[in-house]
Image: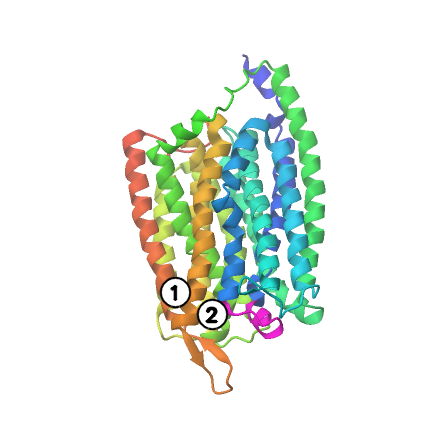
Amino acid sequence: MTQTQIKQTLRDSKAARWSVLALVSFTMLCGYFLTDIMAPMKNMLEEILGWSSVEYGLFTSAYGWFNIFLGMLIIGGIILDKLGPRFTGILSVGFMIAGCALKYYAVAGFIDPEAILWKWKLQVIVAAVGFAIFGVGIETAGITVTKVIARWFKGKEIALAMGLQVAVARLGTGLALSTTIPIAIRFSLSTPVLLGLILLCIGLLAYLVFCVMDKKLDKSLEANLYEPEEPFRLSDIGIILKNRGFWLIAILCVLFYSAVFPFLKYATELMIHKYRVDPELAGIIPAILPFGAILLTPVFGSIYDRKGKGATIMVYGSVMLIGVHLLFTLPFLNYWWFAGIVMLVLGVAFSLVPSAMWPSVPKIIPERQLGSAYALIFYIQNIGLSMVPLLIGFVLDNYCKLDSAGGRTTYDYTLPMAIFTLFGLLALGVALLLKAEDRKKGYGLEEANIKK
């Protein structure tokens, strides 16, 4: 094949591949806006609907129920490798819309707050099931979009593209954390969830436009006589699971994200109880984290594309994660400005590790297996994202309750933050093992992504 022929493919057009990135990133922004829409409202859920910390932890943990216990995420990865990103992406957004609608039904007053099912509030159960269905959709969409970027940016600015996609997703998280409480106070508790539902419908339209472009890419590859990639086989899952590099990436992922996303679920309350921030403003400080990632993740991704050092970047990010949670654990310096500074540092760590981790997977796993590999990584990650919030809720209710002078229950967050610090220490150990494995196997994690 000549160089001229190669340049005729659609993904060699900068306008085309960056347009694709914009479309799928917008869909993910809509999804992540809804993922964290309930996080700032923990206090409101307790005061208005009578939820306890354990019930809130149960609801939050539901995100991974179907992905973990029914293996839906792994099934999604197989569907992705078998049927491609167009079908899988549309299916994923459909799950998100259905789950969001059920969650809205639960918190919008259609269910009696006093109704009980299996010793739990029926309202909590229905909201949790909706969140679990949504979790299937958003996680499958995540692996689909990641494979889309790997396909469209192969041999090009892959880390920058993945960094930008993560940044846009973080914008959704930041908007959720910073706007939910003002919207809920101005209108109602369920209004932010309804807004998320509307955004998801718009995100589906954006993904349909991508599908048209992706079909054109297939035609341009065929016209240039590209050899079709070897088809995915179920036996490939066994090959992936025997890969030590895969396991190190997967374990690093679950440890790192278990110290970040579950923390965000409780960060607003941490600001209220430890740093005495006004409840209406308490979501603004945690919002620093995703907004910081918006700026820095693409920067670090671009450095990885041009200079390499992916494994080293993951080590540095893990070290910063430890420092941040250790500072939040200390029983002094309880000032809002200090919390803001520490959250800024966490934003840097939150940018470093993902900017190098996700683009490193295609260096370890062949393209035909990428969907299943990402699905398995997300599956393992979901174990942490599901179990850790429930653990923190249990710890808060059983070991950290304090009674304030006004009779209102408050919490001491020292022990929960020590748990998050432990996750950071374990993540650092795995990052160092991954760097050693790269030297041994020659994955190229320390090499630049852009091929000359």
In the rendered view, would you say 142 is above or below 399?
above
Q: Are marks 1 and 2 in contact (CB under 8 Å)?
A: yes
In the rendered view, would you say 110 is above or below 82?
below
Q: Position of residue 224 (x, y in %)?
A: 60, 15
In the rendered view, would you say 193 is above or below 373?
below
Q: Residue at x 44, y 47 (%)?
A: 381
Q: Residue at x 51, y 50 (%)?
A: 65
Residue type for callout 1:
Met
Q: On the rendered structure, is 39 left or right of 421?
A: right
Q: Position of residue 175 (x, y in %)?
A: 61, 58
Question: In the image shown, does 296 or 436 lie closer to the viewer?
Answer: 436
Residue extending farthest bottom: 405
Q: Quadrant of residue 251?
A: top left
Q: Residue at x 68, y 45 (%)?
A: 203
Q: Quadrant of residue 8?
A: top right
Per the image, the residue denoted by label 2 is 270
Q: On the rendered structure, is 367 left or right of 173?
A: left
Query: Is residue 48 within the magenta segment?
Result: yes
Q: How far is mark 1 from mark 2, CA to CA?
A: 10 Å
Q: Position of residue 176 (x, y in %)?
A: 60, 59
Question: What's the mark number on residue 417?
Answer: 1
Q: Position of residue 154 (x, y in %)?
A: 51, 29
Over which residues does the magenta segment extend? 42-53
In the rendered view, would you say 297 is above or below 51?
above
Q: For the N terminus, which image quadrant?
A: top right
Label 1 Cα neighbours within 10 Å, binned few <14 / some 14-19 / many ≥20: many
